[in-house]
Amino acid sequence: MIREKRLRPGQKIIQEKLATELGISRTPLRSALQLLEGENLVRAIPRRGMFVRDYTEREVREIYDCRVALEATASRLFATRASEEEVEELAKIFRPFAGQAEIDPQAYQQADIHFHQLLMDGCKNVFLQRLFKQGNVLVCIELIGLVRPASATLPEHLEIVAAIREGDGERAEKIMKAHLMASQK
């Protein structure tokens, strides 16, 4: 519900209502909310209740710091470890948007999420993948949404794909780092 934005950032979670809607008692709901709090997706405010996490500007910068470190490395590894099929799957993601004057932001955001997830999956480094997943980095980014228009990021994504196709891990890493730092700014 948080990822689908049926529960919006900053929204108070009314536990009784949510438990009824989900058809569960409040005890397992409380346990689930505690887990989500540990994953930085909800926040408990004493005497006020539980709220869907709304990231501060500082937290967004910190999330991007993590992305730069993890995804730039994943891009380098993907370029040298991915199969031809994985590279082709990555390349296909942004083809529907090439040459379009008007790009649907929601469709593009889903493609962007898919792209970054495939890079992590294809880097074939279990510990890097675990850090990314445990930090809920992609979910946080999904909640933050696109910070730059597709017209700015599409060429960067295509450059990353080109470097990966060439097996140039250092170039893929450098472009990914610049791509994410531009978004962070």
Image (cartoon, grey):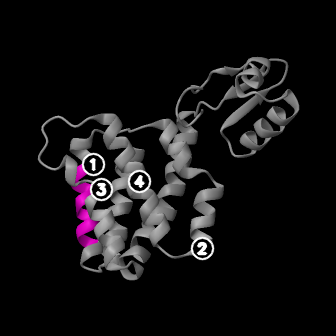
Q: Which residue is mark 4?
A: 114
Q: Which residue is mark 2?
A: 126
Residue occupying the point 26% across, 42% down: 150
User: What kind of residue is marked 1?
Assistant: Thr
Q: CA distance from mark 2 to mark 4?
A: 18 Å
Circles 2 and 1 in contact, beta carbons < 8 Å: no
User: What kind of residue is marked 3?
Assistant: Ile
Circles 3 and 4 in contact, beta carbons < 8 Å: yes
- Mark nearest the camera among 2 and 4 is 4
- Mark nearest the camera among 2 and 1 is 2
Residue 106 magenta: no
Segment colored magenta: 154-163
In the image, residue 48 above or below residue 90 = above
Residue 152 appears at what percent x and percent y?
24, 45
Q: Is residue 129 visible?
A: yes
Q: CA distance from mark 2 to mark 3?
A: 23 Å
Q: Which residue is mark 1?
A: 153
Q: Is residue 28 left or right of residue 4?
A: right
In the image, residue 174 above or below residue 93 = below
Q: Nearer the viewer, residue 13 or 67?
A: 13
Lower sequence index among marks 2 and 1:
2
Residue occupying the point 56% across, 48% down: 62
Lower sequence index among marks 3 and 4:
3
Lower sequence index among marks 2 and 4:
4
Q: Which mark is residue 93?
A: 3
Residue 42 appears at what percent x and percent y?
69, 34
User: What kind of residue is marked 4?
Assistant: His
